[in-house]
Amino acid sequence: MSAVRLPDGGELTFTKDYALNPNGKPFHGIGVIPDVKIEPTIQGIRARKDEVLEKAIQVLNQKIKIEKN
């Protein structure tokens, strides 16, 4: 990270490195693209459920089970 002081006393920070994924495609500004897309539902929110976390745990447990065999 680099920081630049602004005339009004503020500060601007930015990344000056250029990050690439192992396949050579840019990472910066894109982030990690999920393999499984899940979004909260109205029903889940009303029931105070974290559907995104629940799905993540389910997917990880499936991957763990596969790797053990």
Image: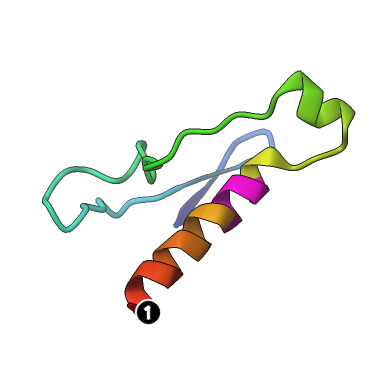
In the figure, is residue 9 to the left or right of 2? right
* Mark count: 1
Q: Read off the residue under disc 1.
A: 68
Q: Is 3 rendered above or below residue 48?
A: below
Q: Is 34 rendered above or below residue 24?
A: above
Q: Nearer the viewer, residue 26 or 51?
A: 51
Q: Residue at x 32, y 77 (%)?
A: 69
Q: Residue at x 35, y 68 (%)?
A: 66
The span shown in magenta is: 53-57
Q: Residue at x 38, y 43 (%)?
A: 31
Quarter-of-image position of residue 30:
top left
Q: Residues within 10 Å of mark 1 (few under 14, many from 20)?
A: few
The spot of residue 43 in percent (x, y) is: 79, 23
In the figure, is residue 5 to the left or right of 66? right
Q: Is residue 19 magenta?
A: no
Q: Nearer the viewer, residue 22 or 3?
A: 22
Kindly give the residue lying farthest to the front in the view shown: 69
In the figure, is residue 30 to the left or right of 55? left
**Element carrying mark 1:** helix
Q: Amino acid at mark 1?
A: Lys
Q: Quadrant of the N terminus?
A: bottom left
The spot of residue 32 in percent (x, y) is: 38, 46
The spot of residue 55 in percent (x, y) is: 58, 46
